[in-house]
Image: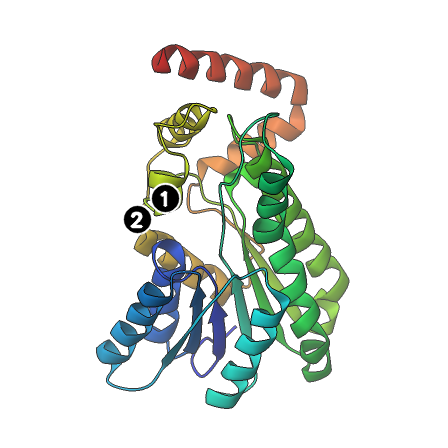
Amino acid sequence: MQIDGTVAIVTGAAAGIGAAVARALVAQGARVVVTDLAADRVSTVAAEINEAVGGERAVAIAGDASDPGLITRTIEVARGEFGPVDLYVANAGTTAGMGLDSDEIAWHTALEVNTLAHVRAAKALVPEWVERGHGYFLSTASAAGLLTQIGSATYSVSKHAAVGFAEWLSVTYGDAGVRVSCLCPMGVDTELLNAGFRGDREDGAAVAASAVRSAGEVLSPETVADVVIEAIGDERFLILPHAQVATMYAQKAADPDRWLAGMRRYQRSLMGDQG
């Protein structure tokens, strides 16, 4: 896919991966609508992008990425400001909930933001893309969606679902010109890691954070964005900024029992560190 001249929407773009991807897309010639719950911060991101390029290449909208009304409004604003949407980056995420004691509200929030937001955006855009013969959907899942997230059932399940939906979308609409990528990093230096899996929570968050940080290098959002831009150009489905995730995923598929036993050992070591 040629990014230059495209119109993109990036959710969860007030900071972290979303903001870095939005900046990288504009640097490649795209125009973007950035959305986030944090109204002031996402507006600042758009303003900084426009200042950097010396023109109106970004527009900000505040709201919940899983809200069907916001999805519709964002698409309408993108179309009105820049033209039809070519690329949707479903990046907003949450670490709501943790283990079996997570309540229904936490499960609802995790599934709404981490999975159903992707489904709703695809429902709004894919029919138009099929008619046009092209379109690109990029789902930010996580290595947790291919492996698992020690300490958090809600995150693991919702991210597995996001990966599954991205796979289905590619299988079902790939021959109609719809391209799909699924971003599955391990640790990235974002608020989701630094504040979401917060060490002062007593529900497994400290172990969850330790699992992410000790599994491999914690990358900068800008490094991840560079990998994303390259992968879009290659139209590559799995985007793995941490190359070792591919090895871990293959080991899991080859011998699930051995892999699960290894994860239990890893969890015990992390719990010992926390104790």
Residue 260, horizontal then vertical, whole percent: 61, 19
Residue 11, horizontal then vertical, whole percent: 48, 63
Query: Amino acid under label 2?
Result: Ser
Residue 98, horizontal then vertical, whole percent: 53, 31
Residue 120, horizontal then vertical, whole percent: 66, 64
- Single out the residue that lies furthest toward the right: 172
Q: Is residue 233 above or below residue 268?
A: below
Instruction: Say which mark, if any, is on residue 217.
Output: none
Q: Disc 1 vs disc 2: Cβ atoms closer than 8 Å?
A: yes
Q: Residues within 10 Å of mark 1 (few under 14, many from 20)?
A: many
Q: Is residue 10 visible?
A: yes
Q: Secondary structure at mark 2?
A: loop
- Relative depth, front residue between 24 and 159: 159
Dividing the picture into quadrants, the one containing residue 138 is bottom right
Q: Which residue lies at the image location 23% right of the left edge and 79% below the top edge?
A: 51
Query: Amino acid under label 1?
Result: Val
Q: Is residue 146 visible?
A: no
Dividing the picture into quadrants, the one containing residue 193 is top left
Q: Is residue 262 left or right of residue 212?
A: right
Q: Is residue 202 above or below residue 120?
A: above
Residue carrying label 2: 220
Q: Which residue lies at the image location 63% right of the left edge and 38% below the top edge?
A: 157
Q: Is residue 273 above or below residue 123?
A: above
Q: Secondary structure at mark 1?
A: loop
How is this picture coloured?
A: rainbow
Residue carrying label 1: 188
Q: Is residue 169 left or right of residue 96?
A: right
- Number of labels in the image equals 2
Of callouts 1 and 2, which one flags the residue occurring earlier in the amino acid sequence? 1
- Relative depth, front residue between 259 and 190: 190
Q: Which residue lies at the image location 30% right of the left edge and 48% below the top edge?
A: 220
